Image: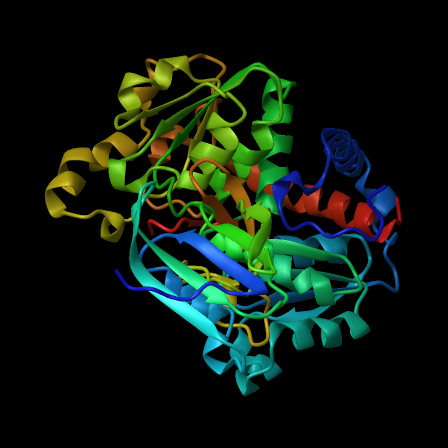
Amino acid sequence: MLNITSIKKGLVIDHIRPGMGLKIFEYLKLGKADFTVALIMNATSNKMGRKDIIKIEDVIDVDFAMLGFLDANITVNVIEDEVITEKINLSLPVRVQDIIRCKNPRCITTVERDITHKFVLLDKEKGIYKCEYCDHIYSWEG
Amino acid sequence: MLKGRHLVDPQDFSIQELESIFELTQEIIDKPEEFNSICHGKILSTLFYEPSTRTRFSFEAAMLRLGGGVIGFSEPGSSSVAKGESLADTLRTVAAYSDIIAMRHPNEGAPKHGIQYCPVPLINGGDGGHQHPTQTLTDLFTILESKKRLDNLTIGCCGDLKFGRTVHSLIKAMSRYENVKFILVSPKELQVPDYIRTEILEQRNIEFQEVERLEEVIDQMDILYMTRVQKERFFNEADYVRLKDSYIVDLKKLKDAKEDLAILHPLPRVNEIAVEVDDDPRAWYFRQVKNGMFVRMGLILKLLGVK
């Protein structure tokens, strides 16, 4: 079993869908961090079988809405003095901006410069969004 | 209050606001001479990023019949768009010269993006395969004229329902009225897009059926909205050969239809309505095309706040 030391103060992003950890790591720009970070991939999990985990030895600003969009099953643990002081369960945000791109090849976002890519949540259960410009459906399943 | 508003999506206006446009449209039809100089000194810009005959002509004719002026382009090659100008900058510029803008654009969602930069009313004259709200105003007005109501109707939409933006806009608009049912007739590969089915029809609990053959359902319809099915839209030749005649209305099929059916078509037609139907009292499509100009006159007056 791989051991990663616990952190004194910071965040543990837990229950990340396997394979999504690296994407979140990149989204949070942790590759450029000057504090201790750990990305654990394919850790064993009673609940999920396998999961990814990110540990961050610092208090950073995280856009939980966007994190929820990347993976709504994530739990964020806030750590103070090596103790979990807060557990944040994420959910899908109603709106997302500049995280994903519309897959409709005829959408205005494919041709217009400097346009904000905007999506609105259509179905919370199925995780379905639609492009605010062309109404094209977006879901993680493609 | 419609003064200063944009029209991007057929649902941008409330039912009451649509009624006010239709009342004004009827006034214009009844007494055109009272409106022929009402927009003197006002300018409509028509920005047509892709070809159009009916929509552009009807907008321009509408403004000219109101006594206003028209500037614009009918293909982007003759404008600064060809130099790579963004849509946002083009609209800012054109809005500086005009009082109202009508735009057709090949990219879906272009008007939704454009209104953020457009201080004068922007009217969507069609955006890709997405929406065509002024056609919808025309369709609604023609339905109202033919049936004297917009509720309690069974509306058949036939042809290419996937790429036919006029159908998408019509379903969106008509789904707001009481007890409206839809019969959607198309080959499987050309059925309405998912967002129309889930967001409009299913979420609003609107009764609808999807079938492949017009002859099986034509007897149930109060309105038959025809669109063109292009051969290249079919996935294979065999399906095209099997189904092509199902999307053509002729007098033989109309034998089973109601006496007071109203047949609409956004035009241009190719062969989906046989010429023999033109003289049938159920043919409303040429009346509909004329209504397109009158409705746009009413819309321009409302958005400019002139009436």
Colour mode?
Answer: rainbow
The answer to whether residue B283 shows anywhere in this view is no
Figure check: B10 above or below B202: below
Task: State how many labels appear.
Answer: 0
User: What residue is shown at x 81% (from left), y 60% (from top)?
Assistant: B68
Residue A126, image x, y percentages: 42, 38
Q: Which of these two is toward me, A33 or B228?
A: A33
Q: Nearer the viewer, residue B261 or B188?
A: B188
Farthest residue in the left direction? B238
Please identify the quadrant where the N terminus of chain A is shown.
bottom left
- Above or below, comparing residue B7 to residue B286 in the picture: below
| Residue B235 as seen in the image, left or right of residue B289 | left
Q: Picture quarter containing residue B175?
A: top right
Position in image of residue B7 (x %, y %): 69, 49
Q: Taking B50 as reference, is A40 left or right?
A: left
Q: Which residue does the image show at 72% across and 39% down from the upper left? A: B13
What x and y, as percent, mark residue B252? Answer: 28, 21
Q: Looking at the image, is B293 positioned above or below residue B185?
A: below
Q: Is residue B81 left or right of residue B22?
A: left
In the displayed structure image, the side of residue A23 where residue A82 appears, left or right: right
Q: Residue at x 46, y 63 (%)?
A: A6
Position in image of residue B65 (x %, y %): 76, 53
Seen from the viewer's position, the closer of residues A32 and B223 is: A32
In the image, residue B283 above or below residue B164:
above
Q: Work out whether residue B282 can be spotted.
A: yes
Residue appearing at x 57%, y 14% in the figure: B152
Q: Which residue ends up furthest to the bottom in the rendered image?
A: B83
